[in-house]
């Protein structure tokens, strides 16, 4: 191998981030399951975007008769206060995917479910990397605390957090973060345990790099694949969690609709208008299933043998 | 040699082609392979990784997986064609007539079953034998593979016996049904040299005794020379040469075979007397094989005809087949290295005065690990603390610009020693000074200027680079870290300079590790180690995971860099020929202690330590006529938790009996250092005169008659 192969590209250009992102997405299209999942998720993203500028009727206004079945004006019917269900369903997508309302009236882009997952990713990654890479007492302490956290029933944890901090979007984010972090930490820890045995970690150590550098620059990028897949699944769980909280009446604050509280509201009139329960439930299910399928396709394609 | 048996061959393979269906097409992994094996014969299949050796073996037993199939050709076993048989038929055949031995014995044995149960199952399932009868047969078989205390071994679990013994169990299991064909796929690659030697003796003996046909797959020419009587050389999915073993080694006709012979150092060669000639380029992946002769892009003799026309597999002499247009005209002795490979031999003693200076001095260095017990008493700290004595009282000095080679079996502490020196572990006791700095502390307590002077090259090319970053980024990191460069432009220039120093070019800057071959990754690893311009580079088996042709190129590169920058190196390897070739000084380690230390040429000739002698005698030599004395070590390396008293080697020493009272003193007293010459010391109770009188392990090739050197 005395002579290296001819230079491919003399002006040194590397694929841009966009190109690499596209390459990653193209991978998903290789899998039918992944494509279907992506389509389902994109459908709801599009619905959320449309609802920002247009809904058939104002979502919070009682303009119609109560508990109407689907008809020509109200395609999905109306709820117990005479509000258009389609409009409410569309608007309900926003809090999950597109916006977060802060207590002082500010609105953050990106929805509660996604912030919650990001929060648990950050917290879980920091804890998991420290436990996995440093080992010893770090590992023992972190994992014991997280195991104790896992031992609590999730609903109880939610109730505790919300009872302590009151209602609000950011509280829901916090609840999702705290309950999601242990799972992420376990995943990251196991990946770190594997990756830290490789020689390039030894190489970094023999350069005298700091533990934080090794954890975040050397190890974390190699844990990226499984983490992304896990995050997709977690967005699904987070939507479930929001639904659950809404159903319990301690979720996202009214009056803006969210799917969980829509199910809860409609539950009381289930005999009068059964379909009002079905629509938001279907919405939750389809988004979660879509995310799961997408994650599955992603996992399938990234772990398949590649040249 | 085996007399020509005129019975029909056990296995005949004719024009075999195996293809795998992959995304978007199919890949022919094996093309046009033909050979046959008779009873009592062992056929060696050699070649570099990715040449299709194992695929041939899998095709025979029908293990090609869901996407592989035999595309063309025939596999005839005992007169019956195996191609197109149903899985069920093949399964029955495999159990009764064909047996396979794999590389890693621990994966072949079920860790949750007792060895006896696993062995017996073969007989009770395939032969319908009663349990008692099966037990008796298994014990007999274990005796035949020289398993000590077979009845006891039957009751143990696989993890309770050593690697060499595990492989013997696997071989015994393979022989239980008295198979007509035994396929061995690198059966000794995972074992230490001393263990390998014993297993190879066993295989050679079983072949004669059981009259089995053996297909032996290996990448190691030395191993093949020891156990096979005919050899086929594979390259890029084709059989390029097939001949009796002696002819392959004495008169190789195919340029690839000749190249393979030139690129491995023979035991006894050193960097001042010989040059290794790597084969340029690399084995093409199966979907990018060239037109014409598959070897022509790497061949020094290639002509137009080789590019245009695919050579047939034709007889060169009786029994000697070769796939080359020019087989008759190429004279390996007249071969001259092409100019870009011509590599200047290092001048003997470098003239500049600073080379003599000692830059690393280690004095009675120890590294103990606390052994973690599993019982409740251990956890509560009620039992006395036990220590794994990984490195025990190691002392040596390394002068600037020289290379120290460290050899020893696995578990001898050579890796721990290197880890302690580089600072991944802190030393338990003793003194170690590097450029006047104390380096018994670990990395977190070392100043940056020591860290940058001490760098390391790692063993495994696949894990030496971070898969997430480009080559340029990874070589650039030490430059930034040690502030060797100020601007990005400067960094780029320096990285390219380093890439060129390891004979890669600027186009590698933006490549990711997965786009590189093993040899290229190892070069990048070397470039990264060189980036901080260290005084001392520790090389932990830098070439042992590479193919032989690439190995030579990397060794040459290291030599060249050492010459150019005057870098000092510590070189760990288990291959004694490589260490001898590469090193100025050699330390032989056993159970955490240096048993012998001295200049390389002194270590490889008497007087030497009995352990060194045994190691040398175990090295497989790629020459079937080489006369190597037969010294085999019994038993295993004792546990470092409780090393033997006195001389650590006394439990296995084959020379103990030379001392009065069968070496009683060896078990009681620590041996003294014997110094046969300045700078050469041997840790042994045997007086120097006795050590001096030991016969050399390697005699110069004298007679051509003794192929059967192994006599147990």
Image (spheres, rainbow, N blue to C red):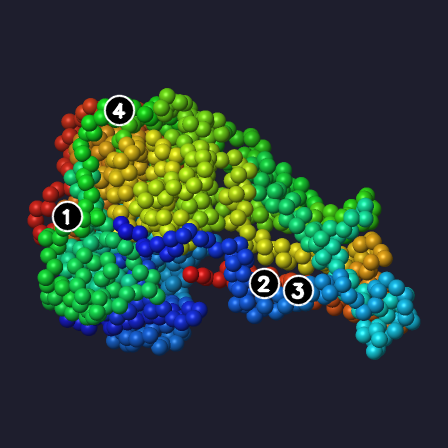
Q: Give the mark nearer the N terminus: 3 vs 2.
A: 3
Q: Do the residues labelled 3 and 1 touch (CB within 8 Å)?
A: no
* Residue at image mark 4: B354
Residue A41 circle label = 3
Judge by depth and name the residue closer to the eye, B600 or B403: B403
Image quarter for residue B303?
Answer: bottom left
Count the numbered circles shown. 4
Determine the residue positioned at 46% across, 53% down: A14
Q: Label 1 marks which chain's residue?
A: B
> Which numbered circle lies on residue A296?
2
Look at discs 1 and 4 and give the one toward the viewer. 4
Chain letter behind tag 4 = B
* Position of residue B582 measured from the top left corner of the image (x, y, whole percent): 24, 38
Taking depth in this image into account, of B251 and A263 the one nearest to the observer is A263
- Residue B237 rendering spot, x and y as whole percentages: 29, 65
Asked whether residue B408 is in view, the answer is no
Instruction: Indicate left or right for B701 with B593 as reference.
Output: left
User: Residue B629 appears at what percent x and percent y?
Assistant: 17, 43
Which residue is labeled 1 in the image?
A: B626
Foreground pick, A27 / B96:
A27
The alpha-carbon separation of the residues under discs 3 and 1 comes to 70 Å
Could you say whether the residue bearing mark 3 is in a helix, strand or loop? Answer: helix
Dots 3, 4 in contact, CB < 8 A:
no
* Crowd around label 2: few <14 · some 14–19 · many ≥20 (10 Å): many
Nearest to the eye among marks 4 and 2: give it.
4
């Amino acid at each position: 191998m005395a002579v290296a192969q001819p230079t491919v590209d003399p002006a040194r250009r590397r694929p841009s981030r966009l190109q690499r992102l596209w390459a990653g997405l193209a991978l998903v299209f290789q899998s039918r399951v992944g494509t279907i999942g992506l389509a389902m998720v994109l459908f709801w993203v599009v619905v959320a975007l449309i609802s920002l500028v247009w809904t058939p009727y104002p979502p919070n206004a009682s303009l119609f008769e109560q508990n109407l079945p689907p008809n020509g004006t109200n395609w999905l019917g109306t709820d117990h206060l005479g509000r258009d269900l389609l409009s409410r369903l569309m608007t309900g997508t926003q809090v999950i995917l597109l916006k977060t309302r802060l207590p002082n009236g500010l609105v953050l882009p990106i929805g509660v479910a996604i912030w919650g997952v990001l929060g648990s990713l950050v917290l879980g990654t920091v804890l998991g990397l420290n436990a996995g890479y440093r080992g010893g007492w770090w590992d023992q302490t972190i994992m014991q605390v997280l195991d104790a956290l896992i031992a609590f029933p999730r609903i109880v944890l939610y109730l505790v957090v919300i009872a302590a901090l009151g209602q609000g979007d950011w509280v829901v984010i916090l609840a999702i973060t705290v309950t999601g972090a242990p799972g992420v930490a376990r995943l990251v820890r196991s990946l770190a345990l594997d990756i830290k045995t490789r020689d390039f970690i030894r190489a970094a150590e023999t350069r005298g790099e700091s533990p934080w550098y090794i954890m975040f620059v050397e190890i974390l990028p190699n844990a990226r694949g499984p983490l992304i897949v896990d995050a997709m699944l977690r967005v699904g769980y987070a939507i479930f969690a929001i639904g659950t909280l809404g159903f319990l009446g301690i979720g996202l604050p009214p009056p803006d609709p969210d799917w969980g509280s829509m199910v809860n509201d409609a539950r009381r009139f289930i005999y009068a208008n059964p379909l009002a329960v079905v629509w938001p439930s279907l919405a939750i299910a389809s988004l979660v299933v879509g995310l799961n399928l997408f994650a599955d396709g992603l996992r399938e394609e990234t772990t398949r043998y590649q040249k | 040699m085996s007399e020509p048996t005129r019975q029909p061959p056990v296995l005949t393979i004719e024009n075999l082609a195996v293809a795998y269906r992959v995304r978007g097409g199919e890949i022919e992994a094996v093309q046009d392979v033909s050979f046959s094996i008779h009873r009592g014969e062992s056929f060696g299949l050699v070649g570099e990784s990715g040449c299709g050796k194992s695929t041939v073996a899998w095709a025979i037993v029908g293990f090609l997986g869901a996407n592989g199939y035999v595309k063309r050709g025939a596999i005839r076993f005992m007169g019956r064609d195996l191609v197109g048989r149903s899985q069920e038929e093949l399964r029955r055949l495999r159990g009764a007539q064909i047996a396979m031995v794999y590389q890693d014995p621990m994966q072949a044995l079920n860790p949750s079953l007792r060895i006896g149960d696993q062995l017996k199952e073969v007989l009770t399932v395939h032969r319908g034998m009663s349990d008692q009868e099966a037990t008796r047969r298994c014990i007999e078989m274990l005796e035949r593979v020289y398993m000590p205390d077979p009845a006891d071994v039957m009751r143990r679990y696989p993890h309770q016996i050593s690697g060499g013994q595990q492989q013997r169990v696997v071989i015994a299991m393979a022989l239980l049904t008295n198979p007509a064909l035994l396929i061995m796929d690198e059966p000794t690659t995972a074992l230490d040299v001393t263990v390998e030697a014993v297993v190879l003796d066993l295989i050679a003996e079983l072949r004669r005794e059981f009259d089995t046909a053996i297909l032996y797959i290996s990448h190691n020419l030395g191993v093949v020379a020891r156990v096979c009587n005919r050899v086929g050389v594979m390259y890029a999915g084709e059989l390029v040469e097939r001949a009796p073993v002696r002819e392959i080694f004495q008169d190789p006709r195919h340029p690839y075979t000749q190249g393979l012979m030139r690129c491995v150092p023979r035991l006894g060669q050193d960097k001042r007397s010989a040059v290794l000639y790597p084969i340029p380029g690399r084995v093409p992946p199966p979907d990018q094989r060239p037109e014409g002769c598959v070897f022509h892009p790497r061949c020094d003799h290639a002509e137009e005809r080789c590019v245009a026309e695919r050579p047939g597999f034709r007889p060169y002499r009786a029994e000697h087949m070769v796939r080359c247009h020019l087989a008759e005209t190429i004279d390996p002795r007249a071969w001259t290295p092409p100019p870009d490979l011509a590599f200047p031999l290092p001048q003997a003693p470098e003239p500049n005065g600073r080379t003599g200076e000692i830059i690393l001095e280690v004095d009675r260095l120890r590294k103990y690990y606390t052994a973690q017990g599993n019982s409740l008493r251990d956890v509560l700290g009620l039992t006395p603390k036990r220590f794994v004595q990984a490195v025990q009282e190691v002392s040596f000095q390394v002068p600037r610009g020289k290379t120290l080679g460290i050899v020893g079996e696995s578990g001898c502490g050579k890796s721990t020693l290197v880890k302690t020196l580089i600072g991944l572990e802190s030393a338990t006791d003793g003194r170690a000074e590097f450029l006047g700095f104390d380096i018994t502390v670990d990395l977190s307590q070392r100043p940056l200027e020591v860290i940058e002077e001490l760098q390391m090259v790692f063993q495994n090319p696949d894990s030496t680079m971070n898969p997430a970053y480009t080559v340029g980024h990874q070589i650039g990191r030490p430059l930034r870290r040690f502030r060797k460069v100020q601007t990005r432009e400067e960094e780029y220039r320096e990285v390219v300079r380093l890439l060129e120093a390891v004979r890669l070019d600027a186009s590698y800057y933006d490549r990711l590790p997965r786009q590189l071959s093993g040899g290229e990754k190892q070069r990048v690893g070397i470039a990264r180690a060189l980036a901080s311009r260290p005084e001392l580079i520790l090389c932990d088996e830098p070439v042992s995971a590479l193919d032989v042709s690439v190995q030579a190129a990397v060794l040459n590169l290291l030599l060249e860099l050492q010459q150019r920058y005057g870098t000092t190196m510590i070189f760990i390897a288990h291959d004694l020929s490589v260490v001898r070739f590469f090193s100025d000084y050699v330390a032989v380690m056993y159970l955490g202690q240096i048993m012998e230390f001295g200049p390389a040429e002194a270590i490889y000739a008497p007087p030497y330590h009995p352990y060194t002698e045994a190691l040398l005698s175990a090295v497989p030599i790629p020459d079937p006529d080489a006369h190597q004395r037969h010294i085999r070590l019994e038993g295993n390396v004792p546990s470092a938790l409780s090393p033997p008293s006195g001389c650590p080697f006394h439990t296995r020493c084959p020379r103990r009996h030379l001392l009065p009272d069968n070496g009683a003193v060896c078990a009681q007293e620590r041996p003294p250092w014997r110094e046969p010459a300045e700078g050469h010391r041997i840790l042994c109770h045997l007086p120097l005169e006795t050590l001096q009188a030991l016969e050399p392990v390697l005699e110069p090739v004298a007679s051509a008659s003794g192929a059967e050197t192994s006599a147990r």
